[in-house]
Amino acid sequence: MKRRVLVLAVPAVLATFLLGAGVFKDTTRHRAASAKPSVYWGAYVAGGQYGRTDAPWDSGALERFEANAGKKVSLVEWGQAWYECSSTCGLRPFRADLLEKIRRHGAIPVLSWDSKHERSGPSDPEFSLSAIIGGRYDEFLRNWALGAKRWGHPFFLRFDWEMNTNSVPYSEHSNGNSPGQFVQMWRHVHDVFTQVGARNATWVWCPNLDYATAVRPLRSLYPGDKYVDWTCLDGYNWGTNPADPKGWKSFDASFGPTYDAVTRSIAPSKPLMVGETGSSEYGGSKPAWITDMLTKQLPHKYRRVKAVAWFNKNVDGEDWIIESSQAATAAFGRGIGLRRYASNRFRRLAGSPIRPLGRAKRR
């Protein structure tokens, strides 16, 4: 439930996995690699632990992360709010320069894009669901979608993630929003992309792991198969870290119930991404947790997972990064080194005009 960025890679792996999953279609005469379908992997790569700024702005941070992991990423994830402040404040346009930087690295961009002011909390009337549904941001959305269309390459759009929490202004738990409005808002934004012909965005619906005190049923927040290409889950093993000691839980104990609900009932035809995950060192063995996730759980029990992104940033006293100990780094490298996790070794296909056509069957 952190607001952050992740790293993943695509144009290379797309030809291998996404073709196999029926999510993207290669419209060229290139023959896909003969390897078995793979899982995209990557991370949100912060630069602070390397004395640098975050990826994708700083390629050096990404290269350091890859060196420590012992493998090239196939995905790179990062975040962009609709309204941001740097030297100036305003609605931020489509950043083709950043997506192109990731593509040239041989990876697929995964953009976590949220309909909010970057500094706003759960209450911000300017970005209420009704304001978006009513068309207040339609011009911005059209221009943004046209920018995506002009860039023309596939990317994952992880839109308004963790909507089932109460910490964001697009949640139905907050900001004066009403039940049913999240789905209305999502469909409205998606329709703008459809109207301008921006077909290269792959729409990712990514709730946080469901929890007992949730006010709205997760199913009620799903926009429908026509409006979603991939499902996704975010979840962490918080352990007993004094910053937020929620208790030690295995990957399976954390993800199992919500994974089952999504893949068996809510969206059984869709591939699934682990959009954010990580583990603390406090309360158990982080190396063993990583090994279990990468070598046992994902390959054998969580076979619908086709992409996974590690949250490699320490926030608010947490210790998520793979470099939290030598043993954790080594365990991550061994696990991600399995052939199941696709690197950008298929970079030779990065220039192919692969389009997000032929996706999973719509209802």
Image (tube, rainbow, N blue to C red):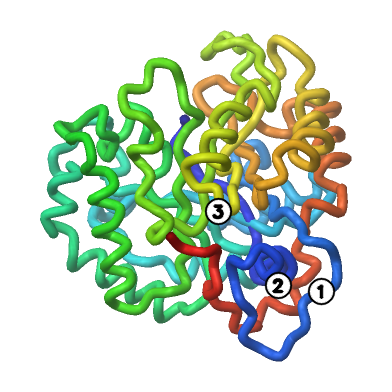
> Circles 2 and 1: CB distance less than 8 Å?
yes
Q: Position of residue 117 (x, y in %)?
A: 26, 44
Q: Considering the image in quadrants, where does the C terminus appear? A: bottom left
Identify the residue at image location x=27%, y=31%. Answer: 121
* Mark carried by residue 270: 3
* Mark carried by residue 268: none
* Mark carried by residue 33: 1
Q: Amino acid at mark 3?
A: Lys
Q: Which residue is mark 2?
A: 15
Q: Residues within 10 Å of mark 3 (few under 14, many from 20)?
A: many
Q: Position of residue 141 (x, y in %)?
A: 26, 65
Determine whether 277 is above or below 91 in the image: above
The answer to whether any part of residue 351 appears in the image is yes
Q: Amino acid at mark 1?
A: Ala
Q: Amino acid at mark 2?
A: Ala
Q: Residues within 10 Å of mark 1 (few under 14, many from 20)?
A: some
Q: What is the CA distance from the residue labelled 3 to the residue labelled 1? A: 23 Å
Comes first in the chain, label 2 or label 1: 2
Comes first in the chain, label 3 or label 1: 1
Identify the residue at image location x=23%, y=50%. Answer: 184
Determine whether 202 is above or below 112 in the image: below
The answer to whether any part of residue 106 appears in the image is no
Q: Secondary structure at mark 3?
A: loop
Count the labels in the image.
3
Is 115 left, or right, of 52 in this rendering?
left
Identify the residue at image location x=23%, y=40%. Answer: 180
